[in-house]
Image (tube, helix red, strand yellow):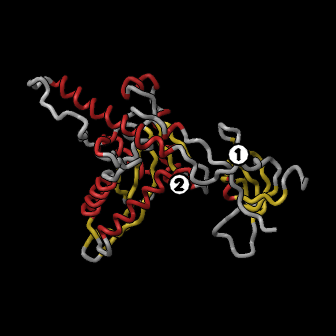
Amino acid sequence: MAHKTETQLMANLPALRLAPYTPPFYMTACDYCGLYNVKILRNKTAKHYGVLFTCLNTRAVHLEMAVDLSTMEFLQVLRRFLAMRGRPAVILSDNGSQFVGAEKELRQMVGDVNEDEVKEFCGEKGMQWKFITPGAPHQNGCAEALVKTCKRALKKAVGSQVLTLLELYTVLLEVANLVNQRPIGRIPNDPDDGNYICPNDILLGRASSEIPQGPFKGTNNPRYRVEFVQKIIDSFWKRWSRDVFPSLIPRKKWQVEKRNERPDDIVVVSDPSALRGKWSIGRVLEVHPGPDGRVRNVEVKTSTGRYSRPITKVAVIHPAEGDD
């Protein structure tokens, strides 16, 4: 009998994805998005990378450029992002070495500063960094999907050309703006619904047809301008609740509840880089159930070490309770 890798009923949408009336990029996911050759001198090129940040609620995109994959370079990228978009409450990423190193650097930097001084200076707590389980890119699907979109746009914009450093940075910014103009959620088919909702509506403060364009009481009082901007923000989140939120609820795959993996299950660990005919046999040491009690991540011990893996990367060949 052929064994398939395990699946489980798709989990409920995480709270990070359901935080309306929060600022853009308050809940953020990030990932690297490709390698690009950049012209340094007349006959010399260098490899540069794009770094994508996406808001988990508005699905807005921010693109930055990194000159290499080091931790210190990513910290510089992160500083530029924070200067432009503000400090997020949570950053979600995969387990790339530069991300893990950046998290350690930030933790050490924060640890050397008095907590009261940090609160006084920042006005809020430090960022929380969350890592997905190794080998589970679907757990950072928001960033992965937009990486694909941005890569496609960059390929069409750049083609086979070799750009200079500033040319590539300009293209990254333009592609981010283009992606932020895409509709999210349901596209209205009734003229009374107004225009479609897109991330730029809240990033750029553009008023929809439902929002009055002013002037307000014939005065330059800044308070009325603040009220106008607030109405734009309220309109965005009302339309988000109407057009985007319903599309997040349905489970499009993994709709069947399966047996939970248990400690002492004997499994085969899926490894795409393994040689043909070589199987990595392991034993489940720990399971990590979600809030609904269903197991989707496990700790597996093999002959080469102990690993954290999603259940989509293991196949149970002998359950702990036997063949009953």
Q: Which residue is drawn at 42% across and 37% down?
A: 241
Task: Label 2, secondary structure: give it.
Answer: helix
Q: Can residue 162 be seen in this view?
A: yes
- Left/right placement of residue 303 relative to residue 47 reads right
Q: Is residue 107 visible?
A: no
The three-letter amino acid code for the residue at tag 2 is Ser
- Residue 29: x, y in percent? 46, 47
Q: Name the residue under label 1.
A: 295
- Left/right placement of residue 87 relative to residue 140 reads left
Disc marking residue 7: none
- Residue 162: x, y in percent? 29, 72
The three-letter amino acid code for the residue at tag 1 is Val
Q: Which residue is drawn at 55% across and 52% down?
A: 95
Q: In this view, does 272 lie above or below 253?
A: below
Residue at the far left: name it.
Answer: 218
- Residue 131: x, y in percent? 55, 46
First in sequence: mark 2 or mark 1? 2
Q: Quadrant of residue 303?
A: bottom right
Q: In which quarter of the image is the N terminus?
A: bottom right
Q: Mark 2 points at which residue?
A: 97
Q: In this view of the protein, which residue sits in the foreground, 96 or 88?
A: 88
Total number of numbered discs in the rendering? 2
**Disc 2 versus disc 1: distance between alpha carbons?**
26 Å
- Residue 292: x, y in percent? 67, 38
**Marks 2 & 1, CB-CB < 8 Å contact:** no
Q: In which quarter of the image is residue 217?
A: top left
Task: Label 1, secondary structure: give it.
Answer: strand
